[in-house]
Image: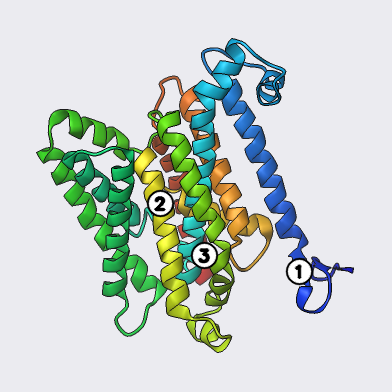
Amino acid sequence: MTDVRFAHRRLVLGRGRHRVVVRVRRAAATAAVTVVVLILGVTALALGDYPVAPAEVVGSFTGRTDGLARTAVLEWRLPRAASAIAFGAALGVAGAVFQTFTRNPLASPDVIGLASGAYTGMILTLIAGGGWAMLTLGSLAGGLAAAVAILMLASRDGLQGFRFIVVGIGVSAMLSALNTWLLLRAELETALFAAAWGAGSLNGVTAATGWPATAVVLVLLAAVPLVSRGLRQLDLGADAARASGVAVSRIRWAAIGLAVALVSVTTAVAGPISFVALAAPQIARRLAGTAEIPIAASAATGAAVLVASDIVAQHVIPLTVPVGVVTVVIGGGYLIWLLAHEIRKTA
């Protein structure tokens, strides 16, 4: 049975234990942003030195388009566009996880040092020599090591969101200094490659790296619903979560592991892309009109932000720049607005 509660803007499907509550505005916002992602994806596939009409882009997937247009869409541009969507969703979810359990809108992997840790692991693996799989493992190890260090330093007398962020900023600064030293000590070719990667770029994404990374990200995103209920309870506070039967430590570590893995896979292929994880969850929360951060809407918003930024980086700016440069400009402006908003709210 379906019961619509307009006062709470909820759609209740079924009864009893089989009841499913769908918040109308959240579902509508997620669907709308998903449509925007699809439109941006088609735009990314259509633009380039050899422009393709949107109808031909769609025809490339249905078999109605062939020749050079099909090659340009499916072989040249699709790996990058699909990777941008997957990586944006991964960063959006990772940011939502950290902002939920710290209960602070400033918590994101790039701010608290996890992206820097993943980048450190990638640089060390790159200096030692290794393919994409080894770079991914190195990034994952670096991100997990940074997460463990931050949690150990911030967990004295209980984990507090503000302390977690401050400790993370300090760890991020130290890791950034270490990364700079490693680049100065590395061979010139390796240092140039890693430095360009450090800006956050999709320019080097190919089918050989983009499709495996996208597959890994999709598997990790499929595991997020396993911890999403616990995260919603953690958003009320650790004590309230324990009272409702949530294993706080287990959920927290599982969520951190998933978030670090999502960031690490993205970093291994595209480098540390800044501010998407910071901005996407808060934008999604405001679009959905909820007090908590919606995971699905955060994924869709992160994908939209990264794909739009990549389009700007490739086709709007006269010189092709790394996508991380565009996200820094967008995210920097958002961060200034967020800090001003928080100050006004506190005052």
Q: Is residue 39 left or right of residue 282?
A: right
Residue at the (71%, 49%) spot, across then down: 31
The N terminus: image quadrant: bottom right
Q: Secondary structure at mark 2?
A: helix
Residue at the (29%, 44%) spot, across then down: 134
Q: Secondary structure at mark 3?
A: helix
Disc on the earlier residue, 3 or 2: 2
Disc on the earlier residue, 3 or 1: 1
Disc on the earlier residue, 1 or 2: 1
What is the spatial separation of the Cα atoms under label 3 and label 2, in whole angstroms?
Answer: 32 Å
Q: Which residue is mark 3?
A: 344
Q: Is residue 66 above or below residue 278?
A: above
What is the spatial separation of the Cα atoms under label 1 and label 2, in whole angstroms?
Answer: 31 Å
Front in this rendered view, residue 241 or 71:
71
Q: Is residue 251 above or below residue 60?
A: below
Q: Total label count? A: 3
Q: Which residue is mark 2?
A: 263
Q: Which residue is mark 1?
A: 21
